[in-house]
Image (cartoon, rainbow, N blue to C red):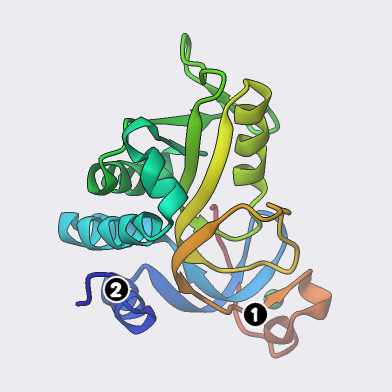
Amino acid sequence: MHLIPTQEEVIALFRESYALRDGHFVYPSGLHSNEYLQVPLALRRYQHQRLLSVGLGRLLRGNPEIRAMMPELSIVAPATAGLPVAYGVCESIRAKQVYWAEREHDNEPLRFRQYLSPEPGEQVVLVDDILRTGSKLSELKKLLESAGASVVGLAVIVYQPAPKIADFGDLPFYYLVKLDATFSADAEQCELCKRGVLAVQVRF
Ligand SMILES: [Zn+2]
């Protein structure tokens, strides 16, 4: 394995841990896809978590502006699924702290735990396991910025772009692997539905 794992190495690791599956999947958003990735399955192995988050940390280190901020940097995840990556990145780049947002119930806005609020001027890298639509990361970015924090980068293990992705402007964006899944807006436009392939409803 390379110090920054290659696309092929990461995909092999996902296949080996059954995190990456081929088939016919329906996402909670209603999108149909031929591919499903559940990164936490791969992160069950501590070695995998280390390899992937250290690799991602190395990518961040390659940005001189981010490198200069590292001792004061906050690593913030939009949900608990991003935490193994966030702590791994924090350790690998010796950043200052990790915290995360969550929502108690669906349809509620993201928020931080009681007594936890970003400091004005705090420099933050957003970290998650995967970016698909980017909607949660975009909500997190707004939440941080509304508290006066400054978001300086975005880093995920996997970039699996959905047809519509949140706009992050020119924010530096890092990922280890890009997966080109086929997405269809609904059953009517889905080739797999037309062919009668059994669909699996996925929860995340
Ligand atoms: Zn379908």
Query: 63 and 85: which one is in front?
Result: 63
Within the image, what quadrant is residue 34 found in?
bottom right
Residue name at image x 50 percent, y 70 percent = 36
Residue 169 relative to residue 65: left or right: right
Give the residue drawn at x 61%, y 52%: 171
Given the current orientation, which residue lies at the most extreme left position?
47
Task: Assign the N terminus to one quadrant of the image.
Answer: bottom left
| Alpha-carbon span between mark 1 and mark 2 | 24 Å
Q: Which residue is mark 2?
A: 5
Q: Secondary structure at mark 1?
A: loop
Which residue sits furthest top? Answer: 115
Residue 90 picture location, percent across and down = 30, 41
In the image, 100 versus 2, the foreground residue is: 2
- Tell me which amino acid carries mark 1: Thr
Amino acid type at mark 2: Pro
| Residue highlighted by disc 1 | 182
Residue 21 relative to residue 202: left or right: left
